[in-house]
Image (cartoon, grey):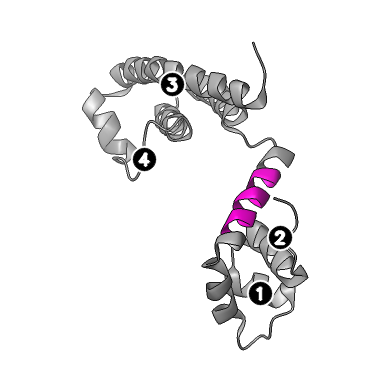
Amino acid sequence: MSDLANPKHELFCRNYAVFASGARAARTAGYAYRTAKWQAMRLLKRPDIQARLAERRAEIAREYSLDAAVLLCKLEAVFIQAYEDRDHKAAARVVEAQARVAGILKGRTPSIPPLLALFGGNESAAEHLAALSEAVKPAVSRQIANENVQKGDKG
């Protein structure tokens, strides 16, 4: 799909994908200030608008290299640094973020202090965090492989 036939709709999609505010996107697209919120709700229900928004978000993600493989690599670097600094709370948060990006975790998860308490202090927490990181790696590898297949890469 390319640009929408209606220029106002296209401008709405471009702005909504960036700002995630329906009223703001509608006003920027040229809809009246008083009716912008209503127009946004109306537009967001349309299948063509929803499809264009998904396409635009994917374009933005590609432009800013926000695919899962890149995010997972960046998170791994943060995990390693946090682990080396013995910042176990930060390392646990990174593992949680990695699991979310890889699609392993969905919804709310336990907060980090109870998670660390389960591990019985910093030393055992470090061991458990390393084990959690190792447990996430297969899913990370699968995610990267799936994305490479979708992009047409063979390696």
Where 108 falls versus 145 (above or below)?
A: below
Whole-angstrom CA distance, mark 3 to mark 1, is 40 Å
Element at badge 3? helix
For marks 1 and 2, the one nearer the N-term is 2
Whole-angstrom CA distance, mark 2 to mark 3, is 33 Å
Q: Residue furthest top?
A: 155
72 vs 144, nearest the viewer: 144
Element at badge 2? helix
In the picture, measured across the screen, residue 111 lies left or right of residue 20, that is: left
Name the main secondary structure of what is drawn in magenta: helix
Q: Residue at x 68, y 67 (%)?
A: 12
Marks 4 and 3: CB-CB under 8 Å? no
Whole-angstrom CA distance, mark 1 to mark 2, is 10 Å
**Amino acid at pointer 1:** Ala
In the picture, measured across the screen, residue 82 lies left or right of residue 88, that is: right
Q: Which residue is mark 4?
A: 106
Over which residues does the magenta segment extend?
Answer: 50-60
Q: Which residue is mark 2?
A: 14
Where 134 falls versus 48 (above or below)?
A: above
Q: Residue furthest bottom?
A: 34
- Residue 97: image tag: none
For marks 1 and 4, the one nearer the N-term is 1
Q: How many marks?
A: 4
- Residue 26: image tag: 1
Whole-angstrom CA distance, mark 2 to mark 4, is 28 Å
